[in-house]
Amino acid sequence: MVLLIPSQTSFLSLVRDLTKRKAEVAGFDQGAPERIALAVDEATTNAIEHAYHGAPDREVELRFDEEGPQLKVEVVDSGEGVDPRAMPRVDLERYASERRRGGLGV
């Protein structure tokens, strides 16, 4: 299944709801559907905010591939890419101890 959404954060609730439901149908349980939906939400947000720099007139494509008890989700954009080698190293222990949120996805 493919879902095309405008590059607007107002569509993120649709992304979360659909992803959660797909994960439930695939058989994930005990909080996993919510965590999967959050991960897809974060990836979609990154596309909107970083690849497209908040431009509301672009599209983000979400590809859902369900094969038995597996769920594969791809978030596709045509925006500006990121060189992961240029990203600063993160001290995960400090990050967790400070209870910080966000900023870890590439």
Image (spheres, rainbow, N blue to C red):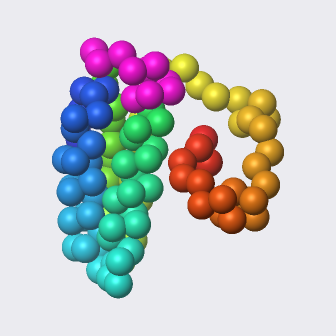
Q: Residue 49 vs residue 66: left or right?
A: right
* Magenta segment boundaries in residue numbering: 48-57
Can residue 1 be seen from the camera position used here? Answer: no
Q: Residue 74 vs residue 9: left or right?
A: right
Q: Quadrant of residue 45?
A: top left
Q: Is residue 101 above or below residue 47?
A: below
Q: Is residue 25 above or below residue 106?
A: below
Q: Position of residue 89 (x, y in %)?
A: 80, 45
The residue at the point 33 percent across, 70 percent down is 33
Magenta stretch encompasses residue 52: yes
The residue at the point 34 percent across, 31 percent down is 60
Q: Residue 87 vs residue 75: left or right?
A: right
Q: Main secondary structure of the magenta part?
A: loop
Can residue 104 be seen from the camera position used here? Answer: yes
Q: Is residue 33 above or below residue 65?
A: below
Q: Position of residue 15 (x, y in %)?
A: 26, 48
Seen as rendered, the residue at the extreme front is 98
Q: Quadrant of residue 95?
A: bottom right
Q: Is residue 102 above or below residue 45?
A: below
The residue at the point 28 percent across, 28 percent down is 8
Magenta stretch encompasses residue 64: no
Query: Observer-nearest residue: 3 or 57?
Result: 57
Q: Position of residue 46 (x, y in %)?
A: 47, 36
Query: Observer-nearest residue: 42 or 96?
Result: 96
Screen quadrant of the C terminus: top right
